[in-house]
Image (cartoon, rainbow, N blue to C red):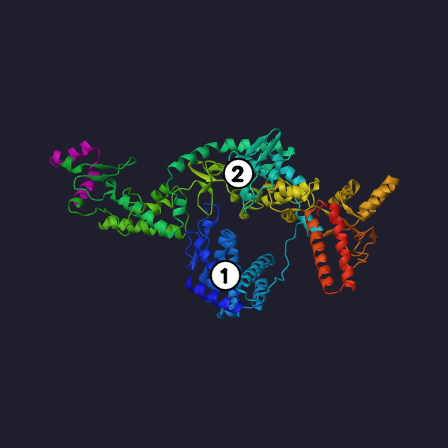
Amino acid sequence: MRRAENVIIELASVGGSDALLSALPRYLNEAPEWLDVDADIWNVAPLNRSVRRKKTNLNLSAILNADLREVVRVYLLSLIVDRRLGDSSLSMSYHAILLLSCVMQSRPISTLKTEDFYVAESAALRSFSSGTAYRYCSILQTFAYWLSLRTGVPLSYKSRIGNSQNHGRRSSEDDRAEKRVPDEVIADIVALWASDDLNERDRFGVAVFAIGVATGFRIGELTTLPADCLIREGDAFLVRNIASKNGREAPRSIPSELAEIVKAAVEYLGEVTTPARRAAQRLAENPPLDWSLIINSPDSRNYFVRRWLSDWIDNPDNRLIDRNYVYYVPRGSTPRWLPLGDLLEKNNGNKSAVSRAAGINRNTLNTLIMQLEASQRGEVYLNSKASGSRRGFDTDRRFPSIHALLKLMNLHLGPGAVRVALDDLLDEARKAMLDGIPFNAPGFDPEFEDQYRFNTQVLKDPDTGNEVLGMHEALLVIFEGQLSEAHATKNDRVVHYSASHLTHWLSGYTRDLGTGKSTDALCARFGICDPRTGETAKLTIHDLRHWISTAYENGGLTPVQIATLFNRKSPSANSIYNQTSVASRRERLKDALKEGRILGHAAQAYAQIAEESPDEARAYLKTATKFYNPMPHGVCTLNWALEPCPHALSCFSCGEAKSADDEPCEHLIIDPEDPYQVAEVERISENAATFCKLLSEMSGVHGPQYKQYKKVERSTASLLKRMGSK
């Protein structure tokens, strides 16, 4: 890291801060042991919790600007150490910064400026979709802030690309409606559980789907449930999971309406996967080689196949020369070694006697005698075969063949580069046998071989590599082919039912969409339609997360309650999953007004009218909630399409004074149970108080600005007091 240190020193001299230079020793000290920080290619796959991920390469040499490359090296290391990012997030950061490298070209790092980031932003818009460009530029913004904060280099880049997310609380009504999966579609899929005609694959998938509907787990969490995930507390059921994305782990409560089907689904899955779990336990105790992993790497393929070929050649049963025995292949029977030399000696070379004693005809005996004589001369008997023929020895079981190798691997291997490589190794082994020369094979390397033994881990701790969930503990573990109608079940091969299995079951394989095959999308195969369009319904497992979050909100749960149910660190994480319609929000607003659960002029007016005339109060309620305009600090009931805001969007400085306090705009409604709105009111109140203090110190209390901010301070303080926030 000497070059990186020199580059950082150069940046510090420009910006005036040595914070990054001071942090560098800590980054190096806390870097993972498996990471060679000076290497040009970082394989960060160990940061992924899945044990199946073997390679996620970041090619730092592709960052052509040498100075920027070293800064990025330190930046990625900081993301690993400080933010504990996974391999996918690191890869995204790396690819985003590649854009900046193209802009910098060979310029010194000291010339890096904000404009370079905006040029990279333009390149992102030209080269990628709006969603990808948004994510890349958000990363560039974070990188610019990190570099400026730690080196003092004046970088003020702010991404100008808006979030293209077309769903969630802040999206349009049409976008939310499109994202919402109709209840009828969810119900139709779950109802398949009661069908007696489901094959094993569909019944398994529906069971997993039902758990997803009830819990809203991410697909990775859903497919890595422990076998003992179901918890019963009195009449209530909970499902425990292993949280992803550094989420908080806590059992997920199951709605009572779905408790029975979730219980049945978990019990069914546990029953059909028990044999595979037991097999996984045996495999964990004595793990065999994982040939599906071995053949994908040239190094491992060369090591293991050569050692197998060497063992094959050294096996006495596969010898090509023997001075006394001949290799005899009876028609329709198993080949065997025949002691022809002894028989000839015993019968004084009488071929007829030998033929009768061995039970072979004279023509065959003559061929075998030629084989014996060739062996006694130290030659390999080829009969009519050409030594250079690839197929000529396929029927001779003494020679290694692709069929024998694939049988060992227990794999099906079609044409391709791997098959060509295996054929070449087989040819080399056959030639060594025919020529009687040593076959080149590597020595035994136990540590290397251990890396390619069957791994029964499902999830691991990226920091320690220790097992978090093994196949013998997982709910969704099956035998290979167990859910297939086209392939036989392989009871010696255990696989984890992964996110890929579940996605293909629900959404189908692209090549088979619309064919009606068993690998077509589920809704197409069972005729499940979207009631809004009449067309075949389309959804993903992740859509269930949006569906249940919206269902909870429509059911009246507060953002804090929903965040608690989903074990989220902050209620703000609910926003993207909330697809509640304006009509539903309006009805909830009416209920909140009736029950006095919100603050504002409309709530006070309704309470006063209701005391005198319930009928007039109902009419007022309908009018007051006709328009619904969400804002960060509340809801505006003004018809913005017909009336411009009379207060220029200044909600807290326009009301009439009530006693010693100021009131906000009469159209503003605030929900004290909404943490977003409360936090925004608190922020506005603190800002107003700060400006009032500054203006007071500057003798500006007689100006209009002071009066404006003072009204904001009073009205927000009054609201916060009533909400119990302060």
Q: Sequence order check: which comes first, mark 2 or mark 1? A: 1
Provide the secondary structure element on which disc 1 rests: helix
In the picture shown, does residue 252 fall above or below 709? above
Q: Magenta span covers which residues?
A: 345-373
Taken as a whole, is the magenta stretch helix, strand or loop?
helix
Name the outermost residue toward the top. Answer: 234
Residue 659: x percent and y percent? 83, 50
Provide the secondary structure element on which disc 2 rests: loop
Residue placed at 46% from the left, 63% from the top? 70
Mark seen at residue 281: none
In the picture shown, does residue 248 fall above or below 161? above
| Corner quadrant of residue 553 | top right
The total of numbered circles placed on residues is 2
Mark seen at residue 225: 2
Amino acid of disc 2: Leu
Residue 584: x percent and y percent? 73, 44
Residue placed at 53% from the left, 67% from the top? 16
- From the viewer's side, name the closer residue of 209 and 118: 118
Gap in angstroms between the C-alphas marked 2 and 1: 41 Å
Amino acid of disc 1: Leu
Residue 512: x percent and y percent? 54, 46
Horizontal arrangement in the rendering, residue 329 relative to residue 106 (left or right): left
Q: Nearer the viewer, mark 2 or mark 1?
A: 1
Would residue 529 be seen by someone viewing this image from the given angle? no
Horizontal arrangement in the rendering, residue 643 relative to residue 323 (left or right): right
| Corner quadrant of residue 523 | top right
Horizontal arrangement in the rendering, residue 659 relative to residue 143 (left or right): right
Mark seen at residue 20: 1
